[in-house]
Image (spheres, grey):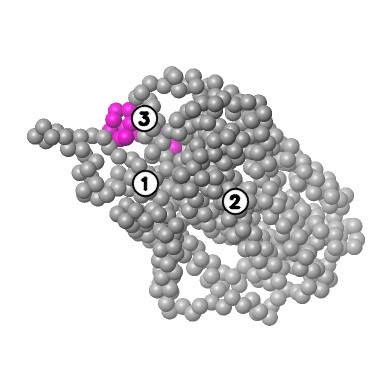
Amino acid sequence: MAQGITLTQVLLIGLGFYIFHALSLGTTFSGAFYFSPLPMSLVVGIILGDVPQAMLIGAELQLMYLGIIAPGGARPADPSIAALVATSLSISSGMSPELAVAAAVPAGLLGEQLNNLTYIINGSCIQLADKYAEEGNSKGIFFAGAILPALPRIILTIPLMVIVYLGPTAGSAIINMIPNWLTNGLAVVGKILPALGISIAVTSIGKKNLLPYFLLGFFIVQYLSIPILPLAIFGFIMAYLHIVFTNKDDKLPSLSFDTGEESQVYSVLSKKDINKAFFIWWTFGESNHNFERYQAATFTMALSPIINKLYDKKEDRIAAFKRHLVFFNTEALFGSVIPGIAIAMEEQKSLGADISDNAITGVKTGLMGPVAGIGDTLTYGIILPIILSLFIPWAKKGSWIAGFAPPIVFAAITIPVGLALCRLGYKMGSKSVAHLLKLGIVNKIIQGASILGLFIMGGLAASYITVSTPIAFNVASIPMPLQETLDSILKGILPLLTVTGIYTYINKFKGTYFKATLLVFALGLILGAVGIIA
């Protein structure tokens, strides 16, 4: 039921969005807000007093945005902004979930353009950081890298507050104007959009030779109706068996890093120093993102306490600040190994080792791409989608847990991993990444996680893509529903064809997310309006 919205509620929604999403504090905590609509739907639901409805909207949007990642920082749409607009519209104006999901699509696209605007403005912050670096002022660098970028984020928040405030009036008017055929078409669009999200997730998660695991998960759920959590356990076992039997001739790699080639001992820096550097990196990894030098300010901020401790002379500190304020961009979790390596090299340089500025910069530049490839694949292409998938059934039941748990679980898993990688980078120096790759651990982890992810995606497709046809034929004056005939041939054939069709368009015809969204909208509206799909 429509309840309207007050100015106080709008301000609280804007504040919640600003704190949890716009500021991007805590890389893998805010990452759940950045890539998932569920947490933001919960925030809006709490403020507007209807958490169950909010989580139902979040569940529909989560399926649609399940495969969204941002390789190199580029993302086609903002799921969190889509959730903010759709959830507030549905609760405040009484808009149906189907219409709210349809409204979320342009909101998500617009939101990403607002994000890009803040990245452009943040370029001035990095230039101010250059000025402070010339002065050897680490506090100034922190101000330019952590405090000042928070101001442009207000630009991202205010337009959304205006949309939320005006939404109930516009939403009610739209509801009264929409004809039945368009309502039917939009309802079908809402049923097809989850297939788009799952298709993108399958594309980002798995190689083509692993796609049978998607089909296995799909048909297990279709015919046995297994819930997602037991399916995930079964998928984990399947992934383990696949790795064991496809690598049965390989010896298990040793996880010992005692190679006799460690870059140093803790002679100057303590474990506390390394931990502090990591948590600065983790906290501000994406908060000052800009198109000029991306994460350069965060990298320098993370090393600033180290630099201040290692170098007594001001000119040495200035040189160190300046060599780290160069272009840097990687995935922040697995990229934690690179600050650790840089710390090791800075320590050796301060102790008199013949390490040039170009050597330090070269190691950073050489590693950021390969590490980003691993990190984007594992962190946001596999780990986060799996976590989110496990909580979609909770969201479908209207439970607040589905919005609260993903950021907590994601952070709890990734923080220890990031800290361990930073320490490893420090301990092993520039040889750490090569050593990990030599062991083959990373490839096995990616392969196993891909199998698990595809298995779960298959189950989600079977559970939540509800495309069907209302067409019936009269045979001897007896109506014969086409859907029953299709189910007798192969249960779930229409949802499966929907996913495979979108997957084929994206992969074979190189369709972009934007074009695929337009295609889904067009086909859904037409097929729903004429009554072919329901």
Q: Is residue 336 magenta?
A: no
Q: Amino acid at mark 3?
A: Gly
Q: Secondary structure at mark 2?
A: helix
Which residue bears the numbered disc 2? 407
Q: Check residue 499 in the rendering and tell me which mark sits there, or answer none.
A: 1
Amino acid of disc 1: Val
Relative to residue 378, is residue 268 drawn left or right?
right
- 75 w.r.t. 273: above or below: above
Magenta range? 517-534
Amino acid type at image mark 2: Pro
Going from N to C along the chain, the mark reached first, 1 or 3, is: 3
Nearest the camera: 115 or 434? 115
Name the residue nearer the viewer: 513 or 422. Answer: 422
Residue 389 can be seen in this image = yes
User: What's the distance in space between the residues labelled 1 and 3, CA to CA?
Assistant: 19 Å
Q: 341 and 473: which one is in front? A: 473
**What residue do we see at 43% from left, 33% from top?**
98
Q: Secondary structure at mark 3?
A: helix
Question: Is residue 525 one of those drawn in magenta?
Answer: yes
Residue 172 in the image: x percent, y percent?
Answer: 50, 22
Q: Residue at x 36, y 34 (%)?
A: 188
Q: Residue 396: give its label.
A: none
Residue that numbered label 3 is attached to: 185
Nearer to us: label 1 or label 3:
3
Circle 2 packing at 10 Å, graded few (<14), some (14-19), many (20+), is many
Q: Are marks 1 and 2 in contact (CB under 8 Å)?
A: no
The image quarter in which residue 431 lies:
bottom right
